[in-house]
Image: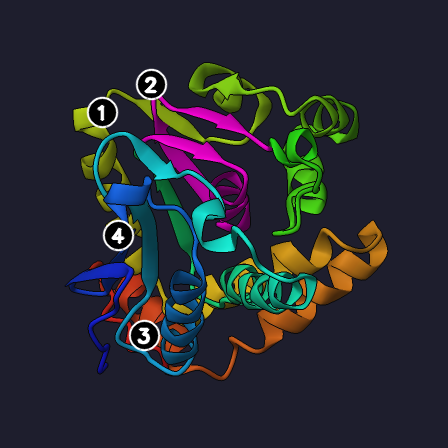
Amino acid sequence: MDIPDYATLAIARNGHVLAVTLNRPQALNALNSQMGLDLIDLWARLANTKDVRVVILTGAGDRAFCAGGDFKERDGMTDEAWRHQHEIFERAFLAIIDSPLPVIAAANGHAFGGGLEFILAADFAYGVSTARFALTEVTIGIMPGGGGTQTLPRAVGGRRAKELILTGRPFSAAEALEWGVLNRVFEPGELMPAVIETAAEIARNAPLSVHQAKKSIQNGLQVDLRRGLEIEIEAYNRLVPTEDRREGIRAFLEKRKPVFTGH
């Protein structure tokens, strides 16, 4: 897969795992217009490749995963320009949420505003014990607009999400783990090896199975149980005629590791 050099992202690939680093450490990896455009372009390319099976999303440096929106860039913007920029951000968040590829967020440092929304847009997240998190938008006259009012309640429950969003109060990595924002917490030097290990484990599985399982979970969460079960069977049946399904069964019977190709 051909990936260009991005102004705000650092890309590294190891086998079927792609590490995407928000790369503006001088600005605590804050989200600006160019980063939004870079993310949109990258995820459009990932939608049409079989080379990548899992994406890791992290930040440069050890201070911040992402400090949120870049308000220095926004200073002096007209209302029209602000809304136009936010449309770019909306597309960037949706590209992550809608990606058929599993996305693991690795919170290497603090995540505020849009930074926390990136973590919530991922399929799941690991973080360092020193990280802090917050959706602080109401303290400066706006509100979460990268999905936070929808993704945070789905992670922590409606009542806790209202407390966190309406106060703008920060919370710790330990609280993020307890409440379901993070799946696991590590000391700083242990984070990326653990994330890479999990990503590699997923990448070894049948990619079409992973895609369909992710799709079934995400779509099923939006409907009642009966419709969710129908969504699951629809996803399951798409795997029956695949070569990977045949390979998986052959490998099981022959007591060997399967070689999946995504077909």
Q: Residues within 10 Å of mark 3 (few under 14, many from 20)?
A: some
Name which residue type carries label 1: Pro
Name which residue type carries label 4: Asn
The magenta stretch is 109-135
Q: Which mark is residue 23?
A: 4
What x and y, as percent, mark residue 52?
Answer: 29, 69
Residue 210 falls within the magenta-colored stretch: no
Among the 4 quarters of the image, the one containing residue 15: bottom left
Say whether residue 198 is visible: no
Q: Is residue 1 left or right of residue 148?
A: left
Q: Which residue is mark 2?
A: 130
Callout 1–callout 2 Cβ contact below 8 Å:
yes
Give me the C-alpha separation between circle 3 and circle 1: 39 Å
Judging from the image, what secondary structure is the residue with disc 2 in? loop
Residue at 30% x, 61% y is 252
Lower position in the chain sequence, tag 4 or tag 1 = 4
* Colouring of the image: rainbow
Judging from the image, what secondary structure is the residue with disc 3 in? helix
Q: Which mark is residue 188?
A: 1
